[in-house]
Image (cartoon, rainbow, N blue to C red):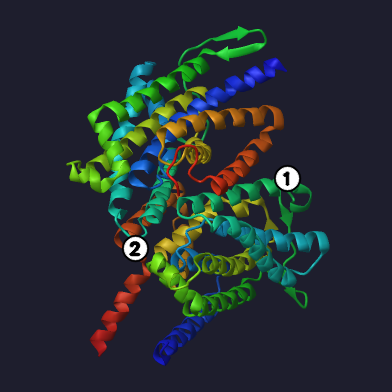
Amino acid sequence: MSTLKRNRFLFEFLGIAAALAIVPALIRDQYFLHITITGLIFGIVASNWNLAIGYGGIFHLAQVPFFAAGGYASAILAVSMGITPWIGLLAAGGAAVVLSVIVGVPSLRVRGIYLVFLTFSSQFIMQSLILFFANITGGDPGLVLPPFSIANINIDIFNPVAMYYMTLLLYLFSLAFIKKVTDSDIGLALKSLRDSEVYAVSRGVNPYKYKMVTFLLSSFLAGVCGALYVHYLRVITPAVLDWSFLIMFLASIVTGGFGTLYGPLLGAFILTFASEALRALSLFRNVIFGTLMIVILIFLPKGLITIADRLLTAYRSRTR
Amino acid sequence: MIAEIASAIIAGVVLASMYALAAVGLTLVWGVLKVLNFAHGSFITLGAYFAWVALMFFGENYPVAILFAVGLSFMLGFVLNVASIRPLQGRPESENNVFIATLATSIVLENLVIIVFGGRYKPIPSLVPGSIAIGTITINFQQLVIIAAAPIILVTLMLYLNRMKSGMAVRAVAQDPDGASIVGIDNRKIYSYTIAIGCLMAGLAGVLLGVIFYLYPGMGGDLLVRVLFVTVLGGMGSVKGTIYAAYIIGLIDAFARYFVGLFWASPILFVMFVIIILIRPEGLYGVKV
């Protein structure tokens, strides 16, 4: 990779970090920050899912179970053993990776629609397990959780500024992580598998191995985000497995841009802010979002980020 | 014990009839277009609500209501094709794109149903009132009608596919789209007709589902998971396999509900689903994958 390209990423990375870092200084409204935090968390989960479905060509629906596994792992550690959520955060990532092995080993052997079905079932099986082990998971009413805290200062929904910076750090980590993965040998192998599986295999690329690695990598931060989200809201219920999360993450990727680095975050921000702004429309909101998804899929298959790209290129060619 | 087994069998056959009617449309679309129509569940819901509308506004005349529901579903099938399937076909990732687009369509339709009709459970006037008691088992006439209607509808569909010229064209496109266009079949036309027929079957299944249970906006979506299972067990794309699979799953479902417990029916089916995909993804009659 050329140094120019690497510098470009560094430039974009620092730009995003700076732009997002000054947000709490500009807008002090707690409610606004709350929505921004939610958007960031959804953006991280969607970006990592995008690593598998956008870059990897592994169209799976297990991202919400990863998210929920992380949330429940940290929640159970905190409630039944009194372990601090800071350790829970790492345990959550670990739990998601373990789940991704359990789901991935059988699922990645099949392809296409069967992969969709298998990963889709994992959500329902997990739901049954949560209700069955209600004595540790809290069942339907769920669990009330301790917040993250440093020196007796709680980082939760009542202290959004601290939470915001914590989520931002995680997003920046996620961004660098995804960039690193897609630029590595794994990314190259995935690209070759996506473009021509037969040729890639004939050149010695093991599809199962690379798909499995991508699947594992994309689950880790989803689990961490699950823990972050539930400790932020201070409660976990089986609703973390809700269908609406899947729709939200998928819609973020579609709206922002399939297989693009910044698309999923853009999509997540647009959707979380739009759904707050259009709250008065209640159910019509979902009708609008569903229609928007179809329109974008048809007319802008690479998402709204392509518009930003086009504007940027037009601007560059004008100034040159 | 015998009475329990008999009731489970009757409940199973009723469920199976529903599953068969709901699944054939989906498997037909898969067989011809090689895409999963996730909006199929919403069309089941729509069919039931259309019948309800007809019964409320045109008087309690079931033949009219069924024709109304089925006709509207058929026509909306063409709209579904133009809006969210055809524009995405031929793309490299078309299978996934169509899945997402039809998923988005199902969100739109389900929310529209709640907006128009409200989210509450709605009863629909019964098709045939009354019931018959044999020993300790009571069977509603409605259940008997559905048990009898499903095979008639399915045989009609099979006859259409096997005997009528347009039906054979549908099968030809499913087997080999290029070969079909060489002999002068317009593939695009067959695609849109197939989707419309799939939606028609979904609408019809919805009417019968509404008759035995209640109407609510998530009724089709809730059924869709079982329908997918039936489709996979039958072999994606095989109408015959899907019909057999529907009766197998219906009976297993009913027996699990009666003898293991309501909570366990879904997990049992899901574990079976996973095992079948892993050891025999082509199902009973599908093509090897």
Image mark 2: chain:
A
Which residue: 47% across, 69% down?
A265
Residue at the right extreme?
A81
Labels 2 and 1: the sequence-earlier one: 1
Going by the numbered disc 1, the residue's amino acid type is Phe
- B203 left or right, relative to A243: left
In the image shown, does B224 or B118 lie closer to the viewer?
Answer: B224
Tags 2 and 1 both on a single chain: yes
Q: Which residue is mark 2?
A: A301
Which residue: 72% across, 47% down?
A139
x%, y% of residue B236? Answer: 44, 42
Q: Is residue B180 above or below residue B209?
A: below
x%, y% of residue B267? Answer: 64, 41
SS at mark 1? helix
Mark 2 to mark 1 CA distance (whole Å): 41 Å
Going by the numbered disc 2, the residue's amino acid type is Pro
Number of marks in the rendered image:
2
Q: Is residue A62 above or below residue B17?
A: below
Q: Which residue is mark 1?
A: A132
SS at mark 2? loop
